């Protein structure tokens, strides 16, 4: 966050992360917006609610009071940020009615009418935001007409005016770097097993896959585009030079869609020597995995790949249009094991009408994958997706009637409430699986720390878990995991004993 200087525009990233003082994800949506409008001449500031680690919005409101911006822009996804964005918008309008408030991002794109009818919101931006935000701010600050600006929405005579989207999307190689300097980077530097100063990075938009549960389905205007290899390398070099970064996590849905891009970036990392200074990881898709590309990436410093496994049931995988099979998942993880590339398995349980047998199939698959990290999510229907439409049509899920109800539904939760369970499996079973794999990942990380004598990472984890509530959750998870393992060993011993006795009996002379 910048020094105490007044701004034309204050961009706020609403709260979506955690109260615990652990590293946040860099808010690339507002970072790219800020970089773009700043180059056009606007004085812009950023406030990331996730970096104040609080449900209380007062720090954010105080920052608004210091900057006294004429315009406030909020980036709003369909999730816990809805409630936070509402609180902030209403508070700002209460103390400064003349401030113009703009909502952009996924939720205003999918629910334009809901958002535009919120009294504290003056404008929405649907679709890609950089050009629309600059033109709208220019109109507001210079008292120009805004009515024909593409990608914006507003109420006129109590009716929603939703201007068409631009036909041309941004060339990501030609936009300015994300405005990293406008946030305090200490809040985003994390320790990982492959880097003591690790940052997240985003170099592409959109996705070519059509998973029925994913929000990308609701973005018909969005096509996959990416920063080119040279620009990727330049960004990473900048982060290394300015923030002493030695680890990068590429947080984007489809990093490796273009093998030529991956190899080109890898060549630059190898030739510049940066691949020896900065280790990196990226999300991948099982159908896109190519052994030769992975080998080349590893030479360039890539040590870790994260795959969306989602389910151990072929029926579920087919139903959610995942474009992969259980057999293919196993093959890819085995390839990574042979190449000594660590992996993460991301999966979802609790799909609508998912059965106990299918949940067990997922549990068995993930248990036997050679994955370093396991991330288990419990399904919630997200708007703009085919699975959301299926749930509402079948009556499995009742669509929230307004923006306030949406905020309540997508609240932060470990899903302890039965009302959020849309499967045919008990909530208790879903939560047990989630705890189990959370604990297994913690054990894997601990063993990796001990194996590599990475005491810095051990201290880091202890510090992160000093929060009493989180520490007790972790200890409870670990205990339950160990109990499960001991129970399994006892059953195995009993089975072996019976087998041994039967063998001896059959061989008595």
Image (spheres, helix red, strand yellow):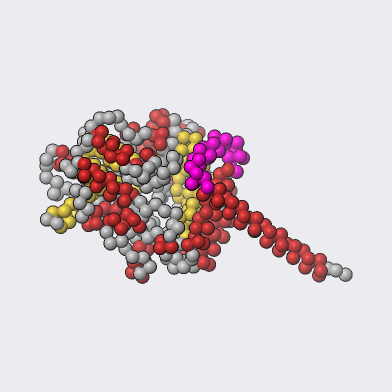
Percent position (x, y) of residue 174? Answer: 29, 39
For this view, does 28 lie left or right of residue 489?
A: left
**Magenta stretch mostly in which secondary structure?**
helix
Q: Residue at x 24, y 34 (%)?
A: 67
Percent position (x, y) of residue 319? Answer: 43, 65
Residue 456 magenta-drawn?
A: yes
Residue 359 magenta-drawn?
A: no
Could you say which is closer to the camera, residue 224 or residue 249? 249
Q: Residue at x 21, y 41 (%)?
A: 95
Could you say which is closer to the camera, residue 323 or residue 135? 135
Percent position (x, y) of residue 109? Answer: 27, 53
Could you say which is closer to the camera, residue 338 or residue 394? 394
Could you say which is closer to the camera, residue 95 or residue 503? 95
Q: Residue at x 11, y 42 (%)?
A: 144
Specify whether residue 192 is in view.
no
Q: Residue at x 71, y 63 (%)?
A: 495
For this view, does 46 lie left or right of residue 137?
A: right
Image quarter of the C terminus: bottom right
- The answer to which image quadrant residue 245 occupies is top left
Magenta-highlighted residues = 447-472
């Amino acid at each position: 966050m910048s020094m105490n200087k007044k701004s034309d525009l204050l961009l706020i990233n609403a709260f979506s992360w955690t109260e615990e003082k652990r590293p946040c994800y860099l808010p690339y949506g507002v970072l790219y917006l800020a970089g773009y409008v700043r180059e056009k001449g606007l004085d812009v500031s950023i406030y990331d609610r996730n970096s104040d680690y609080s449900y209380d919005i007062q720090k954010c409101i105080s920052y608004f009071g210091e900057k006294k911006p004429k315009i406030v822009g909020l980036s709003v996804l369909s999730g816990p940020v809805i409630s936070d964005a509402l609180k902030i918008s209403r508070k700002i309008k209460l103390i400064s009615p003349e401030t113009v408030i703009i909502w952009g991002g996924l939720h205003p794109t999918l629910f334009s009418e809901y958002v535009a009818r919120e009294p504290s919101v003056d404008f929405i931006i649907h679709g890609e935001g950089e050009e629309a935000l600059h033109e709208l701010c220019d109109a507001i600050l210079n008292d120009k007409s805004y009515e024909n600006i593409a990608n914006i929405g507003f109420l006129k005579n109590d009716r929603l005016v939703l201007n068409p989207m631009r036909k041309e999307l941004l060339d990501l190689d030609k936009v300015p770097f994300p405005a990293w300097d406008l946030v305090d980077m200490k809040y985003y530097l994390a320790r990982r097993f492959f880097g003591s100063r690790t940052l997240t990075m985003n170099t592409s938009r959109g996705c070519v896959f059509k998973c029925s549960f994913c929000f990308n389905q609701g973005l018909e205007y969005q096509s996959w585009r990416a920063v080119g290899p040279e620009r990727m390398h330049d960004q990473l070099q900048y982060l290394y030079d300015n923030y002493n970064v030695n680890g990068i996590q590429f947080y984007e849905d489809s990093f490796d869609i273009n093998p030529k891009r991956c190899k080109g970036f890898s060549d630059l990392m190898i030739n510049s020597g940066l691949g020896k200074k900065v280790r990196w990881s990226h999300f991948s898709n099982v159908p896109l995995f190519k052994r030769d590309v992975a080998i080349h990436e590893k030479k360039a410093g890539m040590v870790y790949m994260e795959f969306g496994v989602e389910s151990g049931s072929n029926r579920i995988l087919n139903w959610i249009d995942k474009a992969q099979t259980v057999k293919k998942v196993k093959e890819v993880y085995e390839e990574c094991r042979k190449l000594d590339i660590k992996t993460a398995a991301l999966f979802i349980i609790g799909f609508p009408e998912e059965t106990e047998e299918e949940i067990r199939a997922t549990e068995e698959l993930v248990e036997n994958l050679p994955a370093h990290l396991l991330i288990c999510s419990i399904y919630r229907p997200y708007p703009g997706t085919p699975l959301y439409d299926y749930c509402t049509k079948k009556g499995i899920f009742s669509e929230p009637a307004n923006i306030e109800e949406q905020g309540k539904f997508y609240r932060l939760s470990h899903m302890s409430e039965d009302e959020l369970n849309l499967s045919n499996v008990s909530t208790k079973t879903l939560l047990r699986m989630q705890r189990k794999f959370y604990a297994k990942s913690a054990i894997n990380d601990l063993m990796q720390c001990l194996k590599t004598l990475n005491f810095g990472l051990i201290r880091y984890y202890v510090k992160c878990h000093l929060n009493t509530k989180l520490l007790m959750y972790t200890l409870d998870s670990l205990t339950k995991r160990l109990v499960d393992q001991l129970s399994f060993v006892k059953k195995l011993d009993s089975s072996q004993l019976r087998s041994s006795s039967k063998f001896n009996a059959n061989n008595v002379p």
